Image (cartoon, rainbow, N blue to C red):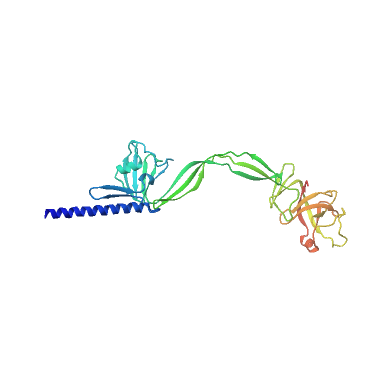
Amino acid sequence: MIKEKTKRRSWARRWWQAAFVLLFVGVIAFETVPEVRASTVYLLTDGLYTMVSGGARLDDRIVYTGAGADGSVLLEPDRRVTIRRGGMEQYATSREGESAAELLAREGVAVGPLELVRVDLSGDEALLEIGTDFTYYETVAEAAAFRTVYEPDPTLPKGETRVEQAGQPGWHEVTYEVVYADGAFVSRQAVAESNDTSVSEVVRVGTLVTEAQQGDTIASVLTNDDGSGYLILSSGDSLHFTGTMNIRCTAYNKDEPGLGELTFSETPVHVGVVAVDRSVIPLGTWMFITTLDGSYTYGMSHAEDTGVRGNTVDLYMDSIPECIQFGVRSSIAYFLDK
């Protein structure tokens, strides 16, 4: 009977050893398939032998934040450490030359195959947080190139540029949002910038023209102490004026009785030609004319005709109905140095 039991045990041991070898070979084969390799450690034993196979070391699944260090960093000795998983916490004290993985092993904390360990060394106490999903923020100093700022300059001819302030590179702090899900890295993107020490380069871009575009209007007026200044037009262009005059504006057309196709200066009549009192506004004067309330802009005007008295300016228009609709309006003439 004893011999029979011994035979059965010997046969069972040989069967288990064979099964064990097959299982072990299966595990090894499983781990050699691309993208299928397990990320945990398998411990296989038959009671007599112990074999270890498996995947990533715990050190490879440790994420360091707040230290600017890689996974090889060691904890400072005698530092209080909080180990957090879910809503539970336990506490430990680090030892000389101890890594995060070694501390967890000493404390008997096992990390699952899809879990990560986030080590935050930014505070007085070290934090080891275990989980599958992490979203955290890290701020790092990075080189900052200077920006170029373009500012319109009504005093420079259009198209010309002038560097008013040279740019200087510097540093800035960039805050990144880092996301891990199911134990895997998902994204890292900048969400904020601060404390930029770079100096922007300021470039003046000229907008000064000698003639406004048809239909352009005045957006603002820059006036100097001597009465001269610049018209900032809606198009972005600018015109330089030497002075202004409040005027009374009327309108005329060549089809009115006694008028013809030519001006006093023997030039053809057209929109932009105006009649003036030569003793008040010399012939050949260029102006930009708009009503005082800004409701109507005649625009570029050239004094080529006569027939009015005092500070009245007669504006040529394409038709008599336009002249009637315009009537008489209080206006302002900006004298151009065109």
* Frontmost residue, 61 versus 255: 61
Is residue 37 visible to the viewer in this orientation of the structure? no
Asked if 296 appears above or below 95 in the picture, the reply is: below
Residue 193 on image: x %, y %: 51, 45
Instruction: List the single residue furthest toward the bottom.
Output: 321
Instruction: List the single residue furthest toward the left.
Output: 1
Asked if 42 appears above or below 196 in the picture, the reply is: below
Is residue 270 shown left or right of residue 222?
Answer: right
* Frontmost residue, 82 versus 279: 82
Residue at 50% x, 46% y is: 192
* Frontmost residue, 24 versus 72: 24
Residue 154 on image: x %, y %: 70, 45
* Frontmost residue, 49 versus 296: 49
- Quarter residue 226 falls in: top right
Q: Quadrant of the N terminus?
A: bottom left
Residue at 35% x, 53% y is: 29
Residue 118 on image: x %, y %: 38, 46
Residue 110 on image: x %, y %: 31, 47
Is residue 81 visible to the viewer in this orientation of the structure? yes
Give the number of callouts.
Answer: 0
Is residue 155 shown left or right of residue 83?
Answer: right
Is residue 321 shown left or right of residue 109?
Answer: right
